Amino acid sequence: MEEIGCKKCGKTISSKFSYCPYCGEHLSKEKQDQANYISLCGHCGKGLIMAWATCPYCNGMLDPISYEKYKHMESKNPEAIEARRKGNEYLELRDVANAIKCYEKAVALDLNYALAWAYLGLSLSTLEKDREALPCYDKAIELNPKDSRAWTNKGDSLFRLGRHTEALPCFDKAIEQDPNYVFAWYNKGDSLSKLGRHLEALQCFDKAIELDPNYATAWGNKGLTLSGLGRHTEALPCFDKAIELNPKDARIWNNKGTSLSMLGRYLEALQCYDKAIELDPNIATAWAGKGLSLKSLGRDVESQEYFNKARELGYKG
């Protein structure tokens, strides 16, 4: 990742930031655009915001390891390949509706096109059409049972449908195929947490962090799981790391506030709730948490304003 100098404070920072994490200075529009890219295609020079084995614009090979892993899933029908490539281009551009049309065309041209089935499922999932996505993942897995991404994405759809017990074997299958697939470990931890199996979830979040120490959401969920176990002191460094990596996530600020409140550190908790509300004014639990902290400080009248706002936003606690 490219490093650049902030013109305001002079600190050297990664170009992945659209603002300086030290002084808050916004980067130029050009640098903000670059900050969204995770890579550049070495063939056509296009900036990419998603990870691909082949470029969605020119179909040039980007990741030799992934390409070797998935090339047998490619079609032998040139029209189907072009439809899949065009779908990838639309998906890269976040035009999911048109991506779906292209993937549907690809599988119509080649019913055994495993890669297109997997991308069709992913696109439907992106639109929260998880029930429709599941048969696509099943078809992709039937054609290629070793596709760790299809197993993980199927598990993710089951997770969003609340079918956590069914999701777990999918993540296990993905990990069996690729023990270093960080998203499978993270999603397995998330499902275990939903099932109340918090100690097992911690092991999964730890593995995800071992594989990717900069995975902010894994740090945040590890903290949340520790908090749920009443281990608030241990949770705080996890929240701090998550905030360092992603200071714009209101949920992490809110969860840190909850742990601080449970430790009786109400003034510090208030600062976290304020930050959460600043980032997301509709996060009801932050309004309620601030009300509880104010009440604990004896500021009962003031707290009612925050309780009322939380209830207005649907808080039922």
Image: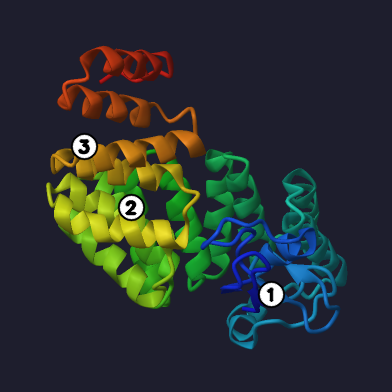
| Quadrant including the C terminus | top left
Q: Earlier in the sequence, mark 2 or mark 3?
A: 2
Q: Which residue is mark 2?
A: 190
> How busy is the neighbourhood of tag 1: few (under 14 within 10 Å), some, or many (20 plus)?
some
Q: Earlier in the sequence, mark 2 or mark 1?
A: 1
Q: Distance from label 1 to label 3 (Cα)?
A: 43 Å
Which type of secondary structure does the marked residue at label 1 adopt? Answer: strand
Residue type highlighted by circle 3: Tyr
Residue type highlighted by circle 2: Asp
Which mark is nearer the camera, 2 or 3? 3
Which type of secondary structure does the marked residue at label 2 adopt? Answer: helix
Which mark is nearer the camera, 1 or 3? 3
Residue type highlighted by circle 1: Ser
Q: Is residue 44 left or right of residue 238?
A: right
Dots 2 and 3: beta carbons under 8 Å? Answer: no
Q: Which mark is residue 266?
A: 3
Q: Earlier in the sequence, mark 1 or mark 3?
A: 1
Image coordinates of residue 312 in percent, x first then y, are 42, 13
Q: Which residue is mark 1?
A: 39
